[in-house]
Image (cartoon, rainbow, N blue to C red):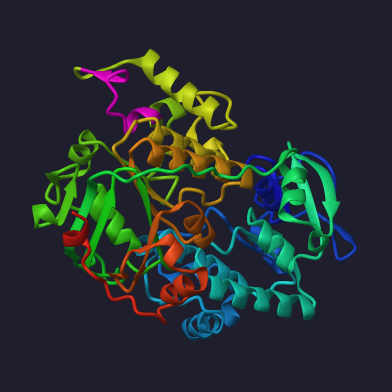
């Protein structure tokens, strides 16, 4: 299933899974007309779904969340079964870990394993591979092909056109809530699929010659203990990002990305003030607000709840991270400025919304992501840290976001991108490192490495011992 953000893909899947009631029409399951009123009925029929936006209870353990979808007779040996299935498919999970302590990528593993344990006859997968290394993606594809060979039908939604072409026998394209075409993706190219999706050519980011400036973000031998029993302790993290360059950090989710982002954004403060230097100022001991005042902008990996408040309007969400005098001046909120800022962001980034008064939760995942990225870029930062900037975003919007990051770099902004999208990092970054088990590999120029080498480091099979580059680059 292909389509732009907001085309209706997730809504259609929710109808099939019993979350949303259709206004008209019929669903036939194995030849019979059925009315699927809730997910429990869908599971009884043999329908399972891996969600893009997770349906997990944060305060429960992995095992308890999965138990909610497994009948009691099969739940007694559940922890052992979770370990076996997660090991078999390369999706490591601790059944006793509580979900609130997990990163976005780790939560996605819970969704995938929960679905596989149900042994469904129809498996719906909505953007399932953002958590995986390139090698693990290939293992998952082997698993899906084996499931299909055993008679399981798989309905696969992805914005990664290479994935659709690699494993799907047929593709259906939605645009504006309507089916606009079908094809055999194995006989198509990325360009022809993109034309079906967006009605035009697939945009490609353009680079121009540039020379990096002085260090804008310096991380020096940062050590940080995990703040929960299942977190990852950071050890001797050293990193320099210069003005006018993009540095990428790749890695499988759960290897310290969440802790590193918290330390860099100011969500967690540090004992050593010089562990993080921002625009020449020691800020390790200072919080998020102080760092933003110095010119930091931040795109978190979790859209709803951290990137935006679900029940607040887009205008109010624009205000939350503002340091712009046009929005707040001498303690007074300027409503006209807020609405104009939000309207510019919506228009420039093609956000599909009813306007600045639309609440964040009413947007599709990709459209909310476009708004959050645009909001932060429009702050005119000196340093931008972006986690998973194009997660769940369609190919056209992803290209737009990547170009916006490149334009920021070309205008002298220091950009740090933390992503599991290896193709994305290889496309936009000047230098690249890998985080594994809380340690950072040496940062290498993008032309001195390869996707295969980075994938091995992500999987923990390479040398991820960090070299300090602070003295060499500062």
Q: Give the range drawn in magenta.
A: 318-329
Q: Nearer the viewer, residue 138 or 192?
A: 192
Residue 201 sits in which quadrant? top right
Q: What residue appears at the point 23 percent right and 55 percent down from the top-left corner?
A: 263
Q: What residue appears at the point 71 percent right and 67 percent down from the top-left corner?
A: 166
Image side of residue 40 versus residue 285, left or right: right
Q: In this view, does 472 lie above or below 455?
A: above
Q: Can residue 147 be seen in this view?
A: yes
Q: What residue appears at the point 50 percent right and 62 percent down from the top-left corner?
A: 422
Residue 136 sits in which quadrant? bottom right
Q: Is residue 394 above or below residue 144?
A: above
> In the displayed image of the protein, which residue is found farthest to the right?
31
Q: Can residue 45 be seen in this view?
A: no
Rendered location of residue 337, percent (x, y): 37, 16
Image side of residue 34 versus residue 383, left or right: right
Rendered location of residue 332, percent (x, y): 24, 16
Q: What residue appears at the point 34 percent right and 45 percent down from the top-left corner?
A: 211
Rendered location of residue 96, percent (x, y): 38, 76
Image side of residue 148 versus residue 416, left or right: right
Whether residue 402 appears in magenta in the rendering, the answer is: no
Q: Quadrant of the N terminus?
A: bottom right
Q: Which of 220 and 336 is in front in this view?
A: 220
């Amino acid at each position: 299933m292909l389509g732009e953000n907001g085309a209706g893909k997730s809504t259609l899947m929710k109808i099939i899974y019993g979350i949303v009631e259709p206004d008209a029409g019929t669903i036939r399951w194995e030849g019979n007309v059925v009315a699927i009123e809730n997910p429990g009925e869908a599971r009884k029929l043999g329908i399972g779904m891996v969600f893009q936006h997770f349906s997990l209870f944060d305060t429960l353990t992995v095992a308890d969340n999965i138990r909610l979808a497994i009948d009691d007779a099969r739940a007694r040996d559940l922890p052992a079964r979770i370990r076996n299935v997660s090991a078999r498919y390369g999706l490591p999970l601790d059944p006793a870990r509580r979900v609130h302590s997990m990163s976005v990528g780790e939560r996605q593993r819970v969704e995938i394993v929960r679905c596989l344990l149900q042994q469904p006859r129809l498996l719906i997968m909505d953007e399932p591979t953002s958590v995986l290394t390139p090698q693990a993606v290939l293992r998952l594809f082997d698993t899906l092909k084996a499931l299909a060979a055993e008679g399981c039908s798989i309905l696969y939604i992805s914005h990664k056109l290479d994935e659709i072409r690699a494993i799907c026998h047929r593709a259906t394209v939605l645009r504006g809530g309507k089916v606009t075409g079908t094809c055999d993706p194995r006989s198509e190219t990325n360009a022809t699929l993109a034309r079906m999706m967006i009605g035009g050519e697939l945009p490609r980011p353009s680079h121009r010659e540039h020379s990096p400036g002085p260090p804008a973000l310096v991380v020096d031998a940062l050590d940080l203990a995990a703040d929960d029993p299942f977190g990852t302790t950071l050890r001797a993290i050293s990193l320099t990002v210069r003005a006018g360059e993009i540095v990428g950090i790749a890695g499988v989710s759960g290897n310290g990305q969440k802790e590193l982002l918290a330390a860099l954004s100011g969500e967690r403060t540090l004992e050593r003030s010089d562990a993080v230097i921002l625009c020449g100022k020691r800020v390790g001991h200072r919080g998020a607000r102080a760092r933003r005042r110095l010119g930091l902008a931040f795109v978190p990996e979790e859209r709803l709840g951290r990137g935006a408040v679900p029940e607040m309007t887009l205008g109010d969400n624009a205000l939350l991270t503002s340091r712009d005098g046009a929005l707040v001046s001498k303690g007074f909120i300027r409503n006209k400025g807020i609405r104009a800022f939000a309207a510019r962001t919506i228009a420039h980034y093609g956000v599909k919304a009813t306007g600045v008064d639309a609440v964040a939760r009413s947007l599709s995942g990709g459209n909310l992501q476009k708004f959050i990225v645009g909001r932060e870029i429009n702050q005119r930062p000196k340093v931008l840290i972006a986690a998973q900037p194009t997660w769940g975003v369609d190919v056209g919007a992803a290209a737009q976001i990547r170009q916006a990051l490149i334009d920021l770099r070309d205008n002298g902004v220091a950009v740090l991108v933390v992503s599991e999208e290896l193709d994305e990092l290889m496309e936009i970054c000047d230098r690249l490192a890998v985080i594994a088990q809380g340690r950072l590999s040496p940062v290498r120029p993008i032309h001195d490495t390869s996707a295969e080498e980075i994938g091995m480091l992500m999987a923990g099979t390479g040398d991820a011992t960090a070299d300090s580059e602070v003295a060499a680059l500062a």
